[in-house]
Amino acid sequence: MGQGAHRNVGGTAGAGGGKLSSESTRKRAIALVDVSELEGRLIGLSAGARQAGGLRGQAMDGKQVRGCGTHGRLMHLLSVARHGDGAVLAQVEVATKENEIVAAPKLLKGLELRSTVTTMDAMLTQRKLAGQILGQGGHYLMVVKDNQASMRESIAELFEVGSWMFSQIGTRYWKGESRGKGHGRIEKRTLESSTVLPGWLRWPGEAQVLRRTCEREIIATGKLQREVSYGVTGLLPAQVGPKELEGYWRDHWTIENRLHHVRDVTVGKRIRGARLTHSQRSETASSACCDVGAGQVLPTPLCTTQLIQPKPCPSSALSLPPI
């Protein structure tokens, strides 16, 4: 963005407050913005806020943007979001004739993966992706379901034949438990890990296989639920224990709760009420993603496709350097 456009966006609103420039002026200024470059700068701000030291968790997952099909073709975004606060570190649109498996290597290619643990659901549990993450110096935790049927069966069988576990505690078998109460239920979570299978599975960098058991009681009805899931990770027992593995597994859902849900609400409302081209929908989705990922560094109203009455802009947005 040029210097003039940068000034127009702020209008007379500075740190001391004041009136914003007109909506039409802001739209003309924002029309000059390269959305990809803007998104890159905001993601850079988010990445710079990462915590220092240790292994940092990040979740990779995709979702169709709600409302995009109302006035044109659908849009599916694959994102990498930081565990905990849901800050968006990268995202890419999944092409119409592709899927997340094809898009994921492209998304990760430009990311710094050293000192990170990338978590993903079963669709992205792929040998090629595991190898790429290791090749870029990172770690993975992948959920194993029926799309990797042979591996899932092997992991399930290992933990079901439980007689060997007691003699291997602390050497080839580890177990941790945690409890929680919320959303009308009491939950007990058990995370078991083992180094028995790695080497037999022929999976890139396999270090531990995992079984996670969730037992829930619905407080209002007393109904009991039990869910068992399996996983594989390249992390060694010396690097993480069951407690840390449970934390990474549980925090994977940050991307659903802090990104997908919020983006559905914000983008869905904007798009459903307006007739937009696909490029405009892309700008809207990118803007909202940056809103969420950068901690509202750039406010929602700074989107050229926003057709509702804008709200006042945070002063932090006006302090961004010219593009």
Image: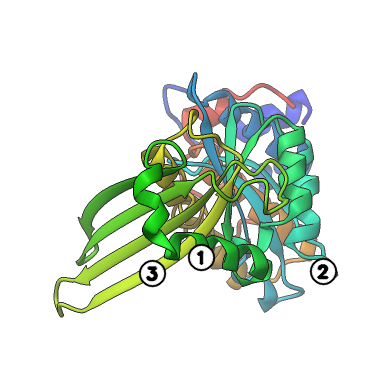
Q: Give the residue type at disc 1.
A: Ala
Q: Where, quadrant-wise, is the C terminus in this rendering?
A: top right
The one of 65 and 201 positioned closer to us in this rendering:
201
Label 3 – label 2 distance at C-alpha = 34 Å
Label 3 – label 1 distance at C-alpha = 13 Å
Q: Give the residue type at disc 2.
A: Thr
Nearer to us: label 3 or label 2: 3
Residue 161 image position (x, y, % from top left): 44, 63
| Residue at the spot of label 2 | 96
The mark nearer the N terminus, 3 or 2, is: 2
Mark 1, secondary structure of its residue? helix
Q: Answer above or below: position of 46 versus 162.
A: above
Residue 168 is left or right of residue 205, and the answer is left
Q: Give the residue type at disc 3.
A: Glu
Which residue is rendered at x = 45% and y = 57% of the image? 211
Residue 108 image position (x, y, % from top left): 73, 42
The one of 289 and 163 positioned closer to us in this rendering:
163
What numbered label is drawn on residue 221?
A: none
Are discs 3 and 1 less than 8 Å apart at CB?
Answer: no
The one of 191 and 99 positioned closer to us in this rendering:
191
Mark 2, secondary structure of its residue? loop
Q: Where, quadrant-wise, is the N terminus in this rendering?
A: top right
What numbered label is drawn on residue 227?
A: 3
| Residue at the spot of label 1 | 156
Residue 252 image position (x, y, % from top left): 49, 50
Residue 290 image position (x, y, % from top left): 59, 43
Which residue is rendered at x = 64% and y = 62% of the image? 151
Which residue is rendered at x = 52% and y = 26% of the image? 50
Q: Residues within 10 Å of mark 1 (few under 14, many from 20)?
A: some
